[in-house]
């Protein structure tokens, strides 16, 4: 009788082994994964396999011959998930919004090599549910809303002082906890900071408010569980811009991670700190390209010259902080690859060698923890109602997310050693 051999509980950024036993010799089967997002939308992936002579399919070592992916992909049933064809066009995402509960993934195996349309009317040979956790009991989740800053603090148990990381998710409503919760499991005290629509924060993103960011840096740096000597500020998209700027605004910034953030203020959002202001580069709407109702904004921002870039961002390249740039080669929202080339020139002119730029082919703009499916088409965070192409393809993007996650953890461990 067919049955699954798979860990019932695991962390969401952990690769797991999926094995089906009890099949007939060289039996053709289809394995499906099904998950409902926190917003109630269903996602799935499926792959067709042939059992070995012992009636076993090991997803880690056996090639899929058809389905959501082809070839040996140990975590393909996770990163290849998308909305079923039967629901029509849909742009939902599997971004985790409630990290206090696990992702529940249903695994099913069917006899034969099925088409997607046939899966929904077929009876599985075996099924099981597994739980992918973000915030296990050994990490404290502490909500912070003191009228000054709004966010969530994740504190691992077992040690008095650990490296501190401030996580800026970009233009996201509320507090984005998915990344911070998982990072805390690797030995960091993480403050996931809310920027809009939480606490006393504004409902709309009006400016890059570095006064607020510095208050969060000071809060985390002085926390009793945070190792002294400086913290890391990491950010993605516009959060990456703010992370770069933070290195000039606070002496408590030891290192910075910028994932697909431009190196200048943009989106009409100036950067402000005390009495200083760095102006946003202009957005040229005439250069928007449209394909089947989906907009591409890649060419809408003119890269400032090396002589005037300091008008658009504080001179981070002159600080003593260490920098890691994680750049997606197929980012279709910002020309971050070109930005990284400009950043490299700025570091070189400043005789600063304390930086690393890593580029990842086939990856799109929105980088999430490992095995989260690609978000290629979604709605623009500021320009309401507009659908945006963020770039990337499922396979390369998944590979990049794993590499970026490991690169960030390695960078943090090295700089906090």
Image: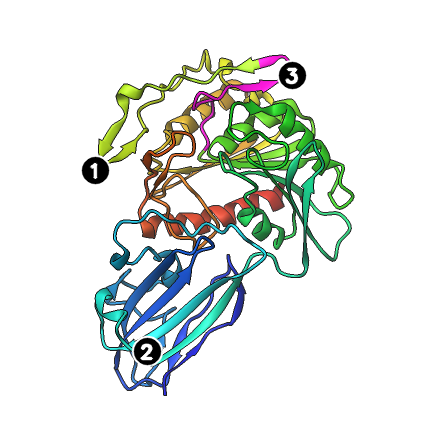
Viewer-proximal residue among 2 and 61: 2
Q: Which of marks 2 and 1 is nearer the N terminus?
A: 2
Q: Mark 3 — residue? A: 274
Q: Which of marks 3 and 1 is nearer the N terminus?
A: 3
x 63%, y 32%: residue: 200
Image quadrant holding the N terminus, namely bottom left
Q: Do the residues labelled 2 and 3 touch (CB within 8 Å)?
A: no
Dot 1 surroundings within 10 Å: few (below 14), some, or many (20 or more)? few
Q: Residue 196 appears at what percent x and percent y?
A: 55, 33
Assign a secondary structure to mark 1.
Answer: loop
* Residue 84: quarter of image: bottom left
Label 2, label 3: how far apart the Cα atoms are? 62 Å
Q: Is residue 275 visible?
A: yes
Dominant secondary-structure state across the stretch colored magenta? loop
316 within the magenta span? no
Q: Mark 1 — residue? A: 292
Image quadrant holding the C terminus, namely top right
268 within the magenta span? yes
Q: Where 361 falls versus 27 (above or below)? A: above
Eye-nearest disc, 3 or 1: 1
Q: Residue 160 appears at what percent x and percent y?
A: 78, 50
Drawn side of residue 216 relative to residue 404, left or right: right
Assign a secondary structure to mark 2.
Answer: loop
Label 2, label 1: how far apart the Cα atoms are? 37 Å
Eye-nearest disc, 2 or 3: 2
Q: Which mark is residue 262?
A: none
Drawn side of residue 10 relative to residue 220, left or right: left
Q: Earlier in the sequence, mark 2 or mark 3?
A: 2
From which residue to which does the magenta span run?
Answer: 261-276
x 29%, y 67%: residue: 47
Q: Are marks 3 and 1 in contact (CB under 8 Å)?
A: no
x 53%, y 65%: residue: 10
């Amino acid at each position: 009788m067919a049955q699954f051999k798979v860990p019932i509980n695991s962390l969401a950024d952990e690769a797991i082994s999926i094995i089906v036993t009890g099949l007939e010799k060289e039996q053709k089967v289809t394995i499906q994964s099904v998950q409902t997002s926190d917003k109630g939308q269903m996602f799935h992936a499926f792959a067709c396999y042939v059992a070995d002579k012992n009636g076993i399919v090991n997803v880690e070592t056996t090639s899929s011959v058809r389905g959501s992916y082809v070839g040996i992909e140990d975590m393909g049933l996770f990163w290849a998930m998308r909305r079923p064809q039967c629901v029509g066009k849909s742009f939902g995402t599997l971004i985790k919004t409630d990290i206090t509960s696990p992702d529940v993934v249903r695994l099913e195996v069917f006899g034969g090599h099925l088409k997607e349309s046939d899966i929904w009317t077929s009876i599985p040979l075996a099924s099981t549910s597994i739980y992918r956790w973000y915030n296990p009991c050994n990490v404290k989740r502490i909500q912070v809303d003191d009228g000054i800053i709004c966010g969530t603090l994740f504190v691992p148990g077992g040690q008095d002082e650990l490296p501190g990381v401030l996580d800026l998710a970009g233009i996201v409503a509320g507090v984005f906890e998915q990344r911070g919760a998982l990072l805390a499991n690797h030995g960091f005290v993480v403050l996931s900071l809310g920027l809009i629509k939480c606490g006393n924060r504004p409902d709309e993103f009006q400016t890059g408010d570095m006064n607020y960011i510095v208050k969060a840096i000071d809060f985390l740096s002085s926390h009793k569980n945070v190792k002294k000597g400086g913290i890391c500020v990491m950010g993605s998209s516009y959060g990456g811009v703010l992370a770069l700027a933070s290195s000039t605004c606070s002496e408590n910034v030891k290192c910075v991670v910028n994932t697909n953030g431009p190196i200048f203020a943009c989106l009409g959002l100036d950067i402000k700190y005390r009495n200083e202001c760095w102006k946003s580069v202009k957005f040229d709407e005439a250069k928007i390209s449209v394909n089947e109702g989906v907009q591409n904004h890649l060419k809408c921002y003119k890269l400032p010259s090396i002589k005037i870039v300091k008008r658009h961002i504080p001179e981070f390249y002159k600080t003593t902080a260490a920098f890691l740039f994680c750049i997606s080669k197929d980012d279709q929202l910002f020309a971050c690859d070109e930005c990284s080339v400009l950043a490299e020139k700025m570091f070189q002119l400043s005789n600063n060698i304390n930086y690393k730029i890593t580029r990842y082919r086939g990856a799109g703009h929105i980088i999430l923890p490992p095995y989260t499916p690609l978000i290629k088409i979604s709605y623009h965070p500021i320009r309401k109602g507009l659908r945006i192409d963020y770039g990337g393809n499922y396979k390369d993007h998944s590979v990049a997310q794993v590499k970026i996650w490991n690169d960030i953890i390695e960078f943090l461990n090295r700089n906090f050693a």
